[in-house]
Image (tube, helix red, strand yellow):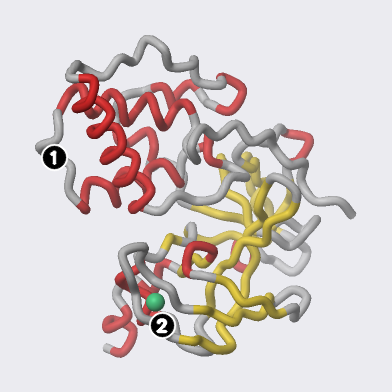
Amino acid sequence: MDGLRPRKNNLINGFTTAEIEKMEKSLNETGDKCLNVEFFKKLARSFNSASGRAGKPKLKWSEVQSWYQNRQLESASKDKKPDTSTLNEPDVTTLTSKDAGDSEHDYSKLKFEARSSKDGAWYDVEKFVTYRNSRSKQTEARVRFVGYGPEDDEWLNVKESIRECSLGIDHSECQILKPGVHVVCFQEKNDFAKYYDAHIVDIKRKMHDARGCRCDFRIRYNHDNVEETVDLNRLYRRPEFERPHQRDA
Ligand SMILES: [Zn+2]
């Protein structure tokens, strides 16, 4: 059976028009005084959980940082305020009305990913339409996927196929990855990526340089046992890795 329909990729330098607008706006409002690592991380996370990012590679905070650095260089060389009038309108087909809002909260309302029964890949959840109990007395949710319509809704077992969203891994955190660790890896197909569960088989540690982690991660996808060597940018961690020391308590 086919997976969910791939969505059109309309990225500009890796960002959606809505994301660029948001960054331009923050530059105009705050100048560069708040541009620290925490700010970039927060912004990258909010972008990754917004519906406009569905079906697109997740952003690293370092990519957000690069955008700001380039933008500042640009405006310094022009010696004028950034001009937002030339920006394209956000693609309304990829946005819910809430995404146009100003508050950070609007971008962080999406917190769950669900595994489609059609292809076994994980997709961001837009909402849970309704619930029911299966014959085996387990709760199932009718899931609306971000970027897809009601025709692609699926009934999914809440325990097995719905979970908190996976998170990007900062380059400085690559040491948390060890053989056997559960990760989510995206497989690139045509012009979009699908997120699949995988686990790490082997790691070749390398010296990090100005571009960050250079380590090679050998991973095996759980659904088909195919192995692949990937870099850190293709890997996502489960949220429980955030505070690994608490698991030992
Ligand atoms: Zn590394």
**Mark 1, residues whose alpha carbon is within 10 Å: few (<14), some, or many (≥20)?**
few
Residue kind at label 1, given as amino acid type: Cys
Which residue appears at 66% of the width and 80% of the height? Answer: 220
* Earlier residue among tags 1 and 2: 1
Crowding near pointer 2: few (<14 within 10 Å), some, many (20+)? few
- In the picture provided, is 37 more to the left or to the right than 237? left
- The residue labelled by disc 2 is 206
SS at circle 2: loop
Whether residue 111 sits left or right of residue 229 in the image: it is: left
**Which residue is outermost to the front?**
77
What residue sits 73% from the left and 33% below the top?
150
How far apart marks 1 and 2 lie (CA) works out to 33 Å
Quadrant in the rendering for residue 81? top left
In-image side of 204 versus 35 (left or right)? right
Using the image, determine if residue 245 lies above or below residue 101: below
| Beta carbon of the mark 2 residue lies under 8 A of ligand 1 | yes
- Residue labelled 1 has its Cβ within 8 Å of some atom of ligand 1: no
Provide residue 27's location: percent of width, then percent of height: 22, 28
Q: Is residue 92 above or below residue 183?
A: above
Q: Which residue is mark 1?
A: 34
Which of discs 1 and 2 lies nearer the camera? The answer is 2
Please identify the quadrant where the C terminus is shown: bottom left
